Image: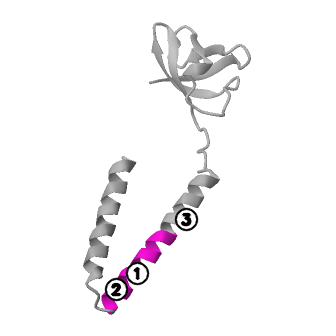
Amino acid sequence: MAEGSVRWFNDERGYGFIVPDDGGPDVRVRSRAVRSPGLPLEDGARVRFTVERGEAVEVVALGAPEVPPGRAVRVAIGALVVLTLACAVTFVVLVVQGSGLSALFLCTLVGVGFALERLGG
C-alpha cells in the first residue's frame, strides 16, 4: 500500500484527491473506498491507500483512533463472564456432592465451549 496526504475531500460530493508520497500524479478517491468508518477524510490527513486503474480503491486514515467496543459488546462480555463463573460454581458443587452428573456437566461445558469457538472464527 502507498502512503500520501489528502489534497482535498468533499464528503457531500463523495470524492477527493490524494497526493502520493512517491511524487506521482494525484489519485482520485471516492467515499466508498474509505475504510475508516465514521471518520471523514480531512484535507492534509495522512492516509495509506491501494491504487487500481488510477483510482484509490482502499483508503485507511493513518493514526485513526481505535473505536472502543460499543455498550452491547461490553454487556455481552460481562454476561459471558458471569455465566462462566456460575458454571464453575455449579461444577464444584456437583463434584463436592459426589454427584455422577459432574462428569456430564463438564462434558457439556467443553462441548459448548468448542461450539462457541467454532462459531467465533
Q: Does the magenta stretch include residue 94?
A: yes
Give the Cα distance between marks 2 and 1: 6 Å
Residue in the image at 71% along x and 13% along y: 13
Task: Indicate the quadrant where residue 29 lies.
Answer: top right
From the viewer's perspective, is residue 25 above or below residue 120? above
- Mark 1 lies on a secondary structure that is helix
User: SS for tag 2?
Assistant: helix
Query: Is residue 80 placed above or below 3 in the rendered structure?
Result: below
What residue span does the magenta drawing correspond to? 82-96
Q: Is residue 93 left or right of residue 46?
A: left
Image marks 2 and 1: residues in contact by CB distance under 8 Å: yes
Magenta region includes residue 34: no
Q: Quadrant of residue 105?
A: bottom left
Q: What element carries label 3?
A: helix
Which label number is shown at residue 94? 2
Closer to the eye: label 2 or 3: 2
